[in-house]
Amino acid sequence: MNHRLSSLKAAIELRHPRMFRRLTWLRDRLAPYYAEPELRLLPALCAPGEAAYDIGANSGIYTFWLCRTAASVTAFEPNPKLAALLESKFAPLIASGRLRVEGCALSDGDGSIVLHVPRSSALASVEAGAVGAHGEEVEAVTVPRRTLDRYDDRPVGFLKIDVEGHESAVVGGGLRLIGRDRPNLLIEAEERHNPGALAALQARLAPLGYRGYFVLAGRLCTLDGFDPDRHQSRSALNAAGTHRVKGRIYINNFIFVARDGVADRLRAALGQSSGS
């Protein structure tokens, strides 16, 4: 069913872009009531006076809410169709200078790179193995490739990274900025897209003073309690691998912090006592 809904969404986006834009606005407003729990933690992760970067913005759920919290937001989206949607959907915020949209893929080098875009969903990736596993048609699009360190023109307090298997390369291309500002990080990482993904992130971030966490059953847990076999079982997803099966556990969002007090703020936001 979810695969059919993804196909329907793609068809509406292609044939009725204005309707699709309005539907995404409605979805964004309702997202805290149904979407991933980390979305509700943005006020604890994103300080009002700092910039936020939404890397892999897609159609803009996180961009929508970050623009209500951060001093400024940069949305990075390599899929040309989705970048155009963001520019249209958030035109007033762009005109005000609160938001900029960058139509490029962040990575660990500059130049160009091939983006693999399934026709039936918006989950594109520069990692060919991360999409098209269930026979859906995939389009190859060459897009600009840049490093996060090129965007060091402002203090950054928060990075959200959702790039379907390319997260370690994104972090690798931004170590100077990350080391300078020590922003709070929310990163999607899945072993099925990139075996060893979480270990690779820890290896890059631990030397910069970062500690890793994930949210399970409404509690903030340290990464030493994460078990890929139990918390990222493929059986917890639908056949297409695009949605979690109701009632099953599937953890793919990880929080990394290097600033004092952030973990306690997250626990408070979750209704959890400090240090528990």
Image (cartoon, rainbow, N blue to C red):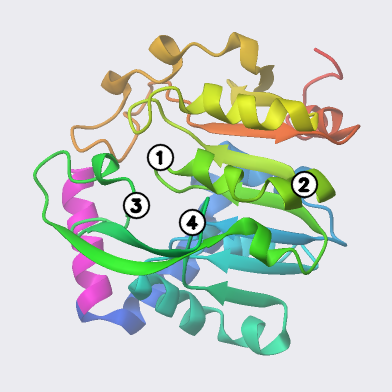
Residue 79 drawn at (x, y percent): 36, 67
Q: Main secondary structure of the magenta part?
A: helix
Dot placed on the residue nearer the N-terminal end, 3 or 4: 4
Mark 3 and mark 4: Cα distance apart in space: 11 Å
Q: Mark 2 highlights which residue?
A: 183
Q: Residue furthest bottom?
A: 95
* Left or right of 65, for residue 248: left
Q: Mark 1 highlights which residue?
A: 165
Dot placed on the residue nearer the N-terminal end, 4 or 2: 4
Q: Is residue 4 magenta?
A: yes
Q: Is residue 222 magenta?
A: no
Q: Secondary structure at mark 2?
A: loop
Q: Amino acid at mark 2?
A: Pro
Classify 186 as above or below 108. Answer: above
Residue 206 drawn at (x, y percent): 72, 26
State the residue in front, 205 or 37.
Answer: 205
Question: Of the numbered discs in the image, which one, if any, rests on residue 56?
Answer: 4
Dot placed on the residue nearer the N-terminal end, 1 or 4: 4
Question: Of the numbered discs in the image, which one, if any, rests on residue 126?
Answer: 3
The segment highlighted magenta reads 1-14
Q: Amino acid at mark 3?
A: Val
Q: Amino acid at mark 4?
A: Gly
